[in-house]
Image (spheres, rainbow, N blue to C red):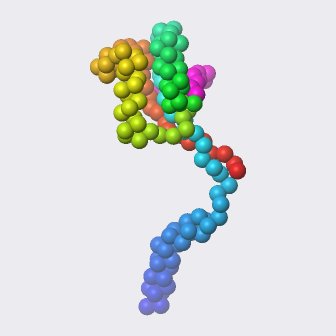
């Protein structure tokens, strides 16, 4: 009976400990402060598609990123080449940084502003993206957030 009582007390302590610890930790100021977001897309460029994709990045992709930057929607963008990709791993990474995530209304406003600037429809942009599937594949993306030491 005593063993069972001790097991119940230990279980109760394990269950309640996670609830107490964050409260104690929250009372202290974090040594880290949140910064910008970075969205990183991993792209696999098929053999023979490097020049075609580089031309797309230097052309339409750059124009789109420059427009977003001029609107204050993003703060920067970069292209990284994976010099030593493992089998099946992306060989190009596209990174876009921005200060905050837009809410739904702001996202819709940006979509309309972009469509007016680009003079294209969603269907046209989707078809163009599909055409790039001939030489590249999106392997995945990550949304990261930078943290700096205070």
Residue at the image point whose x is 47% and y is 78% from the top: 12
Kindly indicate the quadrant of the structure image that contains residue 116: top left
Between 12 and 99, the residue placed more toward the observer is: 99
Q: Can residue 20 be seen in this view?
A: yes
Q: Is residue 112 left or right of residue 19?
A: left
Residue 6 percent across, percent down from the top left? 49, 85
Q: Nearer the viewer, residue 47 or 147?
A: 147
Residue 1 position, x and y percent, is: 43, 91
Q: Does the magenta stretch include residue 83?
A: yes
Outermost residue, right direction?
A: 150
Q: Which x, y percent locates residue 137?
A: 42, 22
Magenta residues, start to end: 76-89
* Residue 53 seen from this side: no
- Left or right of residue 101: residue 25: right
The residue depicted at 59 percent of the width and 64 percent of the height is 26
Q: What percent of the width, then of the height, locates residue 46?
A: 46, 15
Residue 99 part of the magenta-drawn span:
no
* Identity of the residue drawn at 31% across and 22% down: 122
């Amino acid at each position: 009976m005593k063993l069972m009582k001790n097991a119940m007390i230990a279980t109760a302590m394990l269950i309640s400990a996670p609830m107490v610890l964050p409260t104690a930790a929250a009372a202290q100021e974090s040594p880290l402060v949140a910064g910008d977001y970075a969205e990183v897309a991993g792209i696999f460029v098929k053999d023979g598609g490097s020049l075609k994709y580089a031309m797309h990045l230097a052309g339409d992709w750059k124009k789109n990123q420059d427009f977003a930057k001029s609107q204050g929607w993003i703060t920067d963008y970069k292209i990284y080449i994976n010099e030593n990709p493992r089998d099946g791993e992306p060989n190009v990474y596209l990174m876009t940084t921005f200060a905050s995530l837009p809410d739904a209304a702001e996202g819709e406003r940006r979509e309309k502003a972009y469509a007016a600037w680009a003079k294209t429809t969603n269907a046209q942009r989707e078809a163009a993206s599909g055409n790039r599937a001939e030489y590249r594949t999106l392997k995945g993306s990550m949304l990261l957030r930078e943290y700096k030491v205070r």
